[in-house]
Amino acid sequence: MPKKFYITTAIDYVNAAPHIGHAYQKVIADILARWHKLLGEDVFFLTGTDEHGRKVQKAAEKAGKKPKEFVDEISVKFKEAWSALNVKYDRFIRTTDEDHKKVVKEIIETVNKKGDIYLGDYHGLYCVDCEAYYTEKDAPDFECPVHKRPLENLKEESYFFRLSKYQKFLLELYENHPEFVLPDKSRNEVKNRVKEDLKDLSISRTSFNWGVPFPGDEKHVVYVWFDALLNYYSATRQKGKEKYWPADLHVLGVDNTWFHTVYWPAMLKAAGLPLPKTVFNHGFLTFNGQKISKSLGNAISPRVLVEKYGADTIRYFVSRHFPFASGESGDFDEKALIDRHNNELANKLGNLVSRVSVLAEKYGLEKCKIETLKVEETKKKVEKYFESFEVDKALSEIFAFIDRCNEFIQEKKPWESHDKKVLYELACGIKDATILLSPFIPSTCEKIASIFGFSLRLRELDSDLKIRKIKKSEILFRKI
C-alpha cells in the first residue's frame, strides 16, 4: 500500500470573490500535493469554502440575495479561480454540504456528552470580518488588528466549549510534538499566549441565523469557527476516505494560526479523535506593504492575472519569489513577476528547450552514457527542501541544474559539431529538470514531455530517454 498524504488549505469565506492572496496558499498546497503524488504516495488534497456566519449573512443582505443563493454564486468563483491556476484538488468542500453539517452536529453532541459544553453569557469586543472576539490587550484601541476597523461591543447568550480545561494538554503538545505548529516562530507565539491565559470558547450565536442549528437548542447557530474547522475531518467521513484521517498537513495563513493550533487540537481531543501531524502557518502576500484583502480594497483577481500572464507564470512567481517556509509575508510586485518570467522562464528554460529541440529535429539523437548532466544530487537537494517546506529553494535548485544545461550547450556548441550524443545528454537533462519542475509548472512540463517523449514520473528521472523523432518546440514563454 502506498503511503497516504492528506493535505488541506484554509477554506475561504464567501463574503467576496477570491483574490491573489487566497491563490498563493492554494498554489503552494497544490505544488506540495503534486510533489507527493510524484513520490508515488496516495494523496488526498482538500480545499473549499466557509459559507456560514454573520459576515456572510451581511454580505448576502447587501447583495439583495438569500444567503444560500449568495454562497452558491460565490463558491463557483473560487472553483473557477483554482481551475484557472491549474489547482487540482480531490474535493472542494462547502460548509453548507449536508454531510459536513451532519458531522458538526455529531461532534457537538459527543463533546457535550463528555461535559465540555455549557450555557452562559458572552460579553466582548467582536470583529465581524474575522468572526472573532478580541481582548482589550489584543486591541487596546478597540480596533481590529487585522482589518483596522472599530470592534463591536457584543453581549449574547452562548454555549461555551471548556477550552481552558485543555491548557495543559496543548502546552504538552507543543513541547512534545514541535512539528505540530510550524514555523518555529508561530509555535513560540502560540505557546506563550496559551501559557498566559486560556478562556473557554463561545461556540454559538443568537444574533443571526445563518449557520448550522445548534443540536438541542435551535435558537442558537454553531459559531462559524467550530463549524468550519471540522471540514477537514468531515471530508474523511465519506466512504473510502476514512483512511486519510488524521491530516498530514494543514496549510494556513498566519491569521488562522490561533484557531487551528489552539481551538482545533482541543476540539479533536474532546471528541476523542487523532490529531493532525502539522499545521503550517505561512505569511501573507501584501500589496504596497498591506495584506491583500477585499475589505481593504486592494484585492487582485487571480483570473485577471492568469489571463494577463498565464497560470504557470503565476505559479512559478509565487512559489519562487516568496520564502514560504519562513512564514514571512512578501510584497506582490508585477515588475518582479515580469522579470522572473523573462529572465528565468523564457531565457533559461524556454530558450534551452527551443534550442535543443530545433537541433534534435535537424541532427537527431544518439544514446550515450550521461557524463555531465547528472541529476541525482539535484534530486536529493530538492527532496530535502520539500521535506522542510522550502519550495522556493527547491525551485532554485532545479533552475541551477537548468543553468548547468545551458552552460553545457554553450560549451559543446552542437550547432557546430552536430554531435548527436551531446544532444542526447541535453535532452536527458531537459527530461530530468522537467520531471522535477512538474509540480510547479504542470502545463509547460506536459508540453515539454510531449516534445521529447517521456512521462512525468519520478522513476523516469535519471533514466534513458527513448530515441524518437523530435519536432521543434513551440515558444513556451513569450517575452513580456
Image (tube, grey):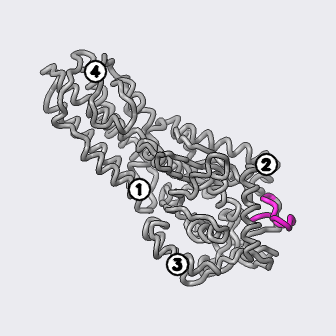
Residue 125 visible somewhere in the drawing: no
Label 1 sits on a secondary structure element that is loop
The residue at which mark 3 appears reads as: 171
Q: Tags 1 and 3 in contact by the CB under 8 Å rule? A: no
Asked whether 159 or 412 is in front, the reply is 159
- Tell me which residue sits at (59%, 80%) in the image: 167
- Under mark 2, the amino acid is Lys
The residue at which mark 2 appears reads as: 68
Distance from label 1 to label 3 (Cα)? 24 Å
Q: For the magenta stretch, what is the residue range?
A: 210-222
Q: Earlier in the sequence, mark 4 or mark 1?
A: 1
Q: Earlier in the sequence, mark 2 or mark 4?
A: 2
The residue at which mark 4 appears reads as: 467
- Under mark 4, the amino acid is Ile
Locate residue 124 relative to residue 391 in the image: left or right.
Answer: right
Q: Earlier in the sequence, mark 1 or mark 3?
A: 3
The residue at which mark 1 appears reads as: 389
- Tell me which residue sits at (44%, 36%) in the image: 442
Label 4 sits on a secondary structure element that is loop
Queried whether the magenta region covers residue 189, the answer comes back as no
Q: Earlier in the sequence, mark 2 or mark 1?
A: 2
